[in-house]
Structure formats: C-alpha cells, structure tokens
Image (cartoon, helix red, strand yellow):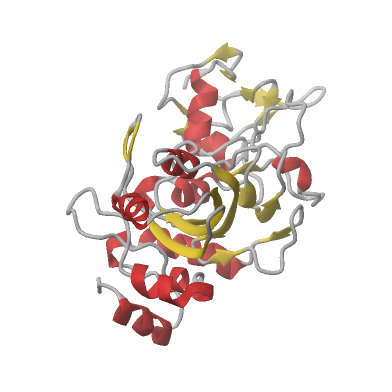
C-alpha cells in the first residue's frame, strides 16, 4: 500500500497506523456481519466495498486501518467489537437471517441486550422449527460450531406421523442418500411410538439443509413438529420459548474445546443422558454414531462431563 491515509480536523491530520492485513471474510466475521462462510457469500454477492470499489474476489486481504471497508453502506471499524455470545430458544415463525429488508421477525431481533452490537446466528433453523440457536459476533466461534469438520452434535426432538418401524430407524442411523450426497448417519432414540405418532430424539453432526425433515421424508414419514433441544453440551433446560440468555464463559470454552477434539476421540456422554426417558432406547442406541469419512469407523459427538459419566457411557457402546 503506497503511503498512509490521513484523517483529522481543521489545520491538522492524524496518521492512521496499520494493524496488518487480514482476510476480508475474517474482518467481516470479527465485526459481527456474518460467519466466515456467510461473509464469503456477502463478498460474492457484491455487497462489500474496499475504498469505494466493489470486491467479489474471495480470499482478498485488507488492512482495515488504512482502507475503508463497507458492507451494504456500513463502514467497518479497524478494531473488532467486543465478542458476544447468546443462546435463544427460537419460536416458530422467526427466521435466522441478518437481512435488513426482511419483513418477518428475525432471531437477532429477539436479543434485547442493548450492548449486543452486530451479531448473527450460528447456522440456521427453518422458520417452522423451534429450539436452540446460538448468536454471536465471533466468526471463529461460529465456524467451529457449525462446520461439519468439527462435528459438534445437534440434537432434535421430532414428532413424526405414524408408527416408525425399526428398519427405517436402522437405515437412518447408518446414513441416507439425499440429493447432495449421503448423510454421515445419526444417533436415534425412540421416546414414544404409537400408531398415529412417534416421538424421536435424533442427533446429527452434519447439518445439511433441512436434513432431519428430509431424512424422515425419505422413508415416508412426515415431521409434524421439530425442535432443537441440544447443541453440544448446551440444552434448553429452564429457557422458555422466545427467551434468550448470554452464554457463560464456561459454555463458550466447552464448545471450543469440543471443536478442538477430533470427533472420533470423543465419547458422547451427554447424548445418552438426553434419552433417559427411554432407557432401553439409550442402551440400544448408545453405540450409534456417524461414520468418519476418513476411516469408516464410528464417530462420536459430544464431550465433556465427568469421568464417571464417561465411564458409564463407554460401557454401553464402543470406546474411542
């Protein structure tokens, strides 16, 4: 960059010191515009400008202290905002988008913290799906929680029409072919099975678009209601629908630690606990988990918990 840009008032100028070049998508993510993947979409869509010029090249680097970066007309500050982390129990009818022109209620609109700054949802839930959503201004945190390579498990309670059969459950556990490829499998616990309605806990590690609904539809079962009840070690306990709370430092660290541990080395003690209402189902399914793409071995989601809890779970299924 030739020279430094100046800023200041009348009769004098103040030199701006370089803070070093960073990738453009990281800069956007660190300032709460979107996750890194979402920031790449903003760049590709021509919504980002550098020094007045639209930039669409992914991988572009920028020095925010020396260059003016705008996203839809909003100027990014050289120093990132304080990082924020929230947990929301999303109601139906609320969408997970930061689009300013969106007319429907957005998840970010429900976070009433005056100091939240710019935040975005970590991944998405469909408009008609209830349950837990993380919101943050930390792009690195968002990437690690939602990218499939880190294998953070998400657990849903699905109510499906009719009595689901064992063969369909087995095939769902092993992986299902969808339009974009085969799923990595799921952990399934049957909570209730009746002639007109079955209630199932299903844990996935991947998060393809509308994956849970599409997987059940693959076997002719319509999902009547769907609610995300767990993200890694975090549950919806004591958090009413439509309410939110900040994540604790411990919860943030637990999620980051989980992402740092290869999924095949984890034993998912929490997920076995989530199915205690159907102990036979837990015992039967404790060894179920998605296969690792690299080795073909079973992968476990989850992590944390006491050593005593890990021992109980390990005794039920496979050990890492």
In the image, is residue 173 above or below residue 59?
Answer: below
Nearer to the camera, 1 or 287: 287
Q: In the rendered image, which quarter contains the C terminus? A: bottom left
Q: Is residue 186 left or right of residue 43?
A: left
Question: What x and y, as percent, mark residue 97?
Answer: 65, 34
Question: What x and y, as percent, mark residue 303?
Answer: 41, 69
Give the residue displayed 47% in from the left and 71% down from the top: 270
Question: What x and y, as percent, mark residue 46?
Answer: 55, 15
Q: Residue furthest front?
A: 195
Decide if residue 3 is in sight here. Answer: no
Q: Is residue 171 left or right of residue 212?
A: left
Q: Is residue 33 left or right of residue 172?
A: right
Number of marks:
0
Decide if residue 250 is in sight here. Answer: yes
Give the residue displayed 36% in from the left and 78% down from the top: 313
Question: What x and y, as percent, mark residue 12?
Answer: 76, 26
In the image, is residue 115 above or below residue 104?
Answer: below
Q: Residue furthest bottom?
A: 308
In the image, is residue 184 above or below residue 76?
Answer: below
Give the residue displayed 73% in from the left and 44% down from the top: 117
Q: Residue furthest top?
A: 53
Specify the quadrant of the image occupied by residue 306: bottom left
């Amino acid at each position: 960059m030739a020279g430094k840009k100046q800023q200041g008032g009348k009769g004098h100028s103040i030199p701006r010191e370089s803070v070093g070049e960073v990738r453009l998508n990281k800069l956007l993510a660190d300032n709460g515009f979107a996750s890194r993947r979402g920031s790449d979409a903003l760049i590709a869509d021509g919504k980002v400008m550098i020094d007045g010029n639209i930039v669409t090249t992914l991988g572009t680097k920028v020095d925010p202290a020396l260059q003016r970066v705008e996203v839809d007309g909003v100027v990014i500050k050289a120093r990132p905002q304080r990082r924020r982390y929230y947990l929301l129990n999303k109601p139906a009818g609320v969408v997970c988008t930061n689009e300013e022109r969106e007319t429907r209620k957005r998840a970010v609109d429900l976070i009433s913290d005056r100091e939240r700054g710019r935040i975005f949802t970590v991944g998405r839930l469909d408009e008609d799906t209830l349950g837990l959503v993380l919101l943050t201004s930390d792009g690195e945190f968002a990437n690690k929680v939602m990218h499939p390579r880190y294998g953070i498990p998400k657990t849903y309670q699905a109510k499906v029409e009719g009595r689901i059969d064992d063969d369909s459950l087995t095939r769902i556990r092993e992986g299902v072919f969808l339009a974009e490829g085969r799923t990595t499998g799921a952990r399934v616990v049957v909570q209730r099975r009746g002639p007109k309605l079955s209630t199932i806990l299903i844990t996935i590690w991947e998060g393809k678009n509308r994956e849970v609904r599409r997987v059940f539809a693959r076997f002719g079962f319509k999902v009547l209601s769907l609610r995300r009840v767990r993200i890694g070690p975090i549950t919806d306990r004591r958090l009413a629908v439509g309410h939110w709370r900040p994540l604790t430092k411990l919860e943030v660290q637990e999620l980051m630690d989980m992402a740092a541990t290869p999924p095949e080395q984890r034993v998912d003690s929490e997920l076995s606990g989530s199915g205690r209402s159907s102990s036979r189902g837990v015992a039967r399914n404790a060894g179920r988990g998605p296969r690792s793409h690299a080795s073909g071995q079973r992968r476990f989601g989850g992590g944390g918990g006491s050593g005593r809890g890990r021992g109980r779970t390990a005794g039920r299924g496979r050990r890492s």
